[in-house]
């Protein structure tokens, strides 16, 4: 028993505080906010009725602001230049520099396609991620100098 007394003594000497999360008083705040919201809503309804009866209350000049908006729209509608990177990479992937990698990728893709069609195939499932990355890296390396020349 002295062993258990030792542990109980240690536990009793440690002060464990119970932590209680205090939720904000939702009832009081929500009531106050809902009352304020009702007052604002009543004010808005009163303002709307006056606007309906008296015509336009704000901004009677509708034609003057449209011209400034058209200038901004024209600036936003400017066409962005065409991105030539995908075109350059495609050309490089078909070039003699990346031809061996392209052939290897195409052969892998054909093997994978046959595996998917053959339900009786029980060998390891293959994907062509590695071949794709090699081809993509080759195409990017080939296209980069051409792209930077075009951007200068």
Image (cartoon, grey):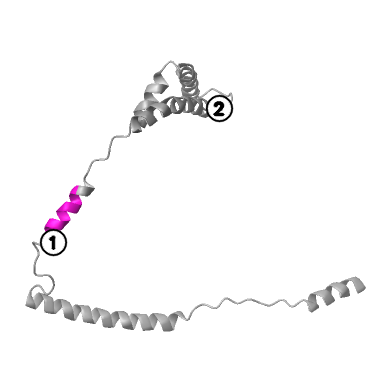
Kindly check if marks 2 and 1 are in contact, taking CB atoms under 8 A apart as contact: no
Q: Is residue 61 above or below residue 86?
A: below
Q: Position of residue 96 (x, y in %)?
A: 43, 15
Question: Is 42 colored magenta in this rendering?
Answer: no
Q: Which residue is located at x 15 percent, y 57 percent?
A: 68
> Of label 2 and label 1, which has the lower sequence position?
1
Query: Which residue lies under the disc numbered 1?
Result: 65
Q: Quadrant of the N terminus?
A: bottom right
Q: Position of residue 116 (x, y in %)?
A: 48, 25
Query: Which residue lies under the disc numbered 2?
Result: 125
Question: Is 69 colored magenta in this rendering?
Answer: yes
Sort mark 1 into few (<14), some (14-19) or many (20+) by Cα contacts within 10 Å. few
Q: Position of residue 142 (x, y in %)?
A: 44, 24
| Quarter assignment of residue 18 | bottom right
- Predominant SS along the magenta part: helix
Segment colored magenta: 66-74
Kindly report which numbered mark, 2 or 1, lies closer to the viewer in this rendering.
Answer: 1
Q: Which residue is located at x 60 percent, y 77 percent?
A: 20
Q: Which residue is located at x 34 percent, y 33 percent?
A: 151
| Quarter assignment of residue 30 | bottom left
Q: Is residue 76 left or right of residue 92?
A: left
Q: Is residue 139 left or right of residue 55?
A: right
Q: Position of residue 26 (x, y in %)?
A: 45, 79
> Which element carries disc 2, helix, strand or loop?
loop
Q: Nearer the viewer, residue 125 or 13?
A: 13
């Amino acid at each position: 028993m002295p062993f258990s007394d030792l542990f109980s003594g240690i536990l009793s000497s440690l002060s464990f505080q119970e932590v209680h999360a205090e939720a904000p008083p939702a009832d009081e705040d929500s009531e106050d906010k809902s009352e304020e919201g009702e007052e604002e809503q009543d004010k808005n309804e009163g303002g709307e009725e006056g606007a309906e009866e008296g015509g336009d209350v704000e901004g009677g000049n509708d034609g003057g602001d449209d011209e400034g908006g058209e200038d901004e729209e024209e600036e936003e509608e400017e066409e962005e230049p065409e991105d030539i990177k995908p075109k350059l990479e495609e050309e490089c992937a078909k070039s003699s520099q990346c031809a061996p990698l392209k052939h290897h990728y195409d052969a892998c893709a054909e093997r994978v396609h046959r595996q998917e069609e053959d339900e009786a195939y029980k060998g390891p499932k293959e994907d062509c991620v590695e071949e794709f990355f090699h081809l993509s890296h080759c195409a990017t390396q080939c296209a980069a100098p051409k792209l930077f020349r075009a951007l200068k």
